Image (spheres, rainbow, N blue to C red):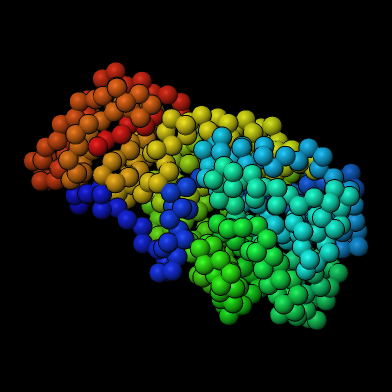
Amino acid sequence: MRAVDVSAVKTPSRNPDSEKALQWWRKARFGLFIHWSLSSIKAGEWKGEVVPGLAEWMMFQKKIPVAEFAPLAQEFNPRKFDAAAWAQLAVDAGMRYVVITAKHHEGFAMYHSKADPYNVVDATPWGRDPLKELAKECRKRRLKLCFYYSQDLDWHHPDGAWNTWDYDEAKKKPERYLREKVFPQLRELLTQYGSIGMIWFDTPLTLSRAQSRRIRKFVKDLQPQCLVSGRIGHGLGDYSLPRDNFLPGARLEGDWETCATMNDTWGYKRTDHAWKPVDNLITTLVDLASKGSNYLLNVGPDADGVVPAPSVKRLHQMGAWMAVNGEAIRGTTPSPFKPEFSWGRMTTKGRSLFLHFFGRPERRFRLHGLKTKVRSAALLAAPEVKFAVTQSVDPATGTPLLDIDFKGFKSTRPVTVVKLQ
Ligand code: FHN
């Protein structure tokens, strides 16, 4: 077995110019994803029928013509929208960044876009710019604000990808879509709202490498510190994004982010009650951090601008856990050991090692291969509770051996963290 030195765990970035921009993002580890657009009005139902699949894909699933879908804008009036409450929810959950849909595949801009009148200020009776309000509230709370932008699929623009029921594929000119909509809107997003943490591009399905490269450069020219998500395509993102809700089986190389739902959809769907238990969400956060991945956890507010109560409850419960254990998640590097352990997971920070126990550890806990000298082992939730540590060399393998006597260990649901330093 290889002997491991905790302080040597590093994450190399994929692009040299990503390194600086990635610093806040690596430290954050946990962020809030918000999917909100016109489809939230229909809440997963079209003409009295529940549409199967993702709520925000309704227009595509039912092949709803633009002429029928776009008038939904006239019904958009989220009287209960409260940007301060949304930003505070992220803070309360222990998150450090927010990614909100500035434009999803349905093509509607959720901000004041001068490039396209199909936007939340000009096309709705509400007439407010929620991104402007959110930017202000995020700034107050030192949350990084990031924008989701669907650079490829757009079912509203005649040249956007994948609307084949209104527009003739053969006649589409993707370059015109980029020129008329994508670049002007990215300019707006990167100049109207202050410093932006990231543009979260999605579903790279039709754009060429050269087009993705131009989009990346466009973002970096306007805001060099703004990250570009992995789904810009062609390996050009500042970090990698696996498929939605992906849970890696082992430690990942480089920087990753798993984006995930709390139920089975991203946008608001009245009939989707498949809420994941909070214990599952917390162990996922721990599991991902131990493998070098961020966790971007989604909420889908309804047409009134209200985040569903089951999501709020779970975020508050996660926040209570993070308030005690956040040190073992934020700013950590992954486990120095490749395999998963049946007892739980590990994260590291400097020369500290955090043991995240999913249950009660064995009274005589053994860890093979840790070279770092450990002076103390204490409960993160109660640092005065310390456990006896012995370090020796395993005579059978000649590698370091750590023994901890977990007498008096009280496990708390769902993960108890012990800090070794
Ligand atoms: O099609 C989208 C989907 O609606 C949602 O936005 C997710 C979030 O990762 N991304 C796409 C599917 O991967």
Q: Is residue 315 left or right of residue 399?
A: right
Q: Is residue 393 left or right of residue 316?
A: left
Number of numbered discs visible in the structure rendering: 0
Q: Is residue 18 left or right of residue 374?
A: right
Residue 248 position, x and y percent, is: 45, 51
Which residue of the protein is positioned furthest toward the top in this rendering?
408
Q: Residue shown at 54%/62% (left/top)?
A: 226
Q: Residue shown at 42%/41% (left/top)?
A: 329
In this view of the protein, which residue sits in the foreground, 33 or 82?
A: 82
Residue 366 position, x and y percent, is: 22, 34
In this view of the protein, which residue sits in the foreground, 115 or 108?
A: 115
Residue 5 position, x and y percent, is: 22, 49
Q: Is residue 265 above or below residue 64?
A: above
The image quarter containing residue 18 is bottom left
Q: Residue shown at 72%/77% (left/top)?
A: 179
In this view of the protein, which residue sits in the foreground, 164 or 348?
A: 348
Q: Is residue 311 left or right of residue 353?
A: right
Does residue 163 appear in this view? no
The image quarter containing residue 395 is top left
Q: Residue shown at 19%/30% (left/top)?
A: 389
Residue 397 position, x and y percent, is: 12, 46
Q: Is residue 136 above or below residue 106?
A: above
Q: Quadrant of the C terminus?
A: top left
Q: Is residue 365 above or below residue 305?
A: above
Does residue 323 appear in this view? yes
